[in-house]
């Protein structure tokens, strides 16, 4: 099986088959996780439950699910929504953010009606650069993951609809995480 790879700063990086890597369309901020099949990107996943990851929120372990915004109208404000769940409860906390090539910024935090976090605690925590929340969320978005089947998500033709017909695919690193960018030609 052919393995895609690239060289960056004198180091060799390989994309592994049957993995999904984040893809960003920098011009509009659209995100997706395409299935990497041999040398082609096929189906683009836009939602994911990261059951393999735990995020600590004020001493409370949480799991995270991620939804990637596909609405062109709201992409300039936010392009990813994280839902943090307590381990024992189905209700959670929503955090909308914007990920771009120049950084990661939290746009909106919606508190949980169950009251497991006070709104003032949450606002302080989300804005505290030492809380590790931003780094944990960024990692959950960027960390590649293995998939079992490539049928989950939108076909490439659907994901790229309205973006034009010619693109340049680039491989990049953000804090040692490999990802793709798809830029107009």
Image (spheres, helix red, strand yellow):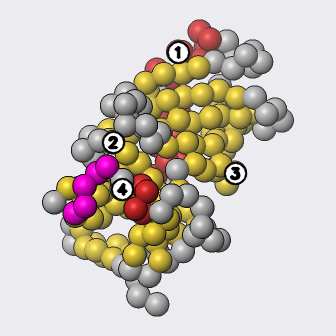
Q: Would you name the residue on which mark 4 appears?
A: 160
Residues at badges 4 and 1 in contact (C-beta under 8 Å)?
no
- The part of the chain drawn in magenta is 162-166
**Which structural element holds mark 3?**
strand
Judged by depth in the image, the label closer to the viewer, 2 or 4, is 4
| Local secondary structure at mark 1 | helix
Mark 1: few/some/many CA within 10 Å (<14, 14-19, 20+)? few
Determine the CA span between mark 1 and mark 2.
27 Å
The residue tagged 3 is 51
Q: Is residue 121 left or right of residue 115?
A: left
Q: Earlier in the sequence, mark 3 or mark 2?
A: 2
Which residue is tagged 2? 29
Q: Gap between marks 4 and 1, in whole Å?
A: 38 Å
Q: Which callout, 4 or 3, points at the residue further toward the start of the chain?
A: 3
The mark nearer the N terminus, 1 or 2, is 2
Density class for disc 3 (Cα within 10 Å; few <14, some 14-19, many ≥20) is few
Residue at mark 3 to residue at mark 1: CA–CA distance: 26 Å
SS state under label 4: loop
Q: Are marks 4 and 3 in contact (CB under 8 Å)?
A: no
Residue under the image location 73 percent in, 16 percent down: 113
Residue 39: x and y in percent read 38, 80
């Amino acid at each position: 099986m052919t393995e895609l790879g690239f060289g960056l700063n004198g180091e060799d990086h390989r994309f592994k088959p049957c993995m999904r890597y984040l893809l960003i369309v920098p011009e509009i901020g659209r995100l997706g996780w395409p299935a990497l099949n041999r040398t082609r990107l096929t189906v683009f996943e836009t939602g994911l439950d990261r059951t393999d990851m735990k995020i600590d929120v004020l001493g409370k372990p949480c799991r995270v699910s991620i939804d990637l915004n596909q609405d062109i109208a709201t992409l300039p404000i936010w392009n990813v929504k994280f839902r943090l769940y307590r381990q024992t409860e189905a209700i959670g906390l929503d955090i909308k953010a914007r990920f771009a090539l120049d950084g990661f910024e939290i746009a909106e935090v919606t508190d949980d009606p169950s009251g497991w976090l006070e709104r003032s605690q949450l606002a302080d925590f989300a804005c505290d650069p030492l809380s590790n929340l931003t780094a944990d969320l960024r990692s959950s978005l960027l960390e590649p993951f293995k998939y079992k089947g490539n049928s989950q998500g939108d076909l490439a033709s659907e994901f790229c609809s309205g973006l034009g017909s010619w693109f340049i695919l680039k491989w990049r690193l953000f804090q040692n995480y490999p990802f793709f960018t798809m830029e107009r030609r």
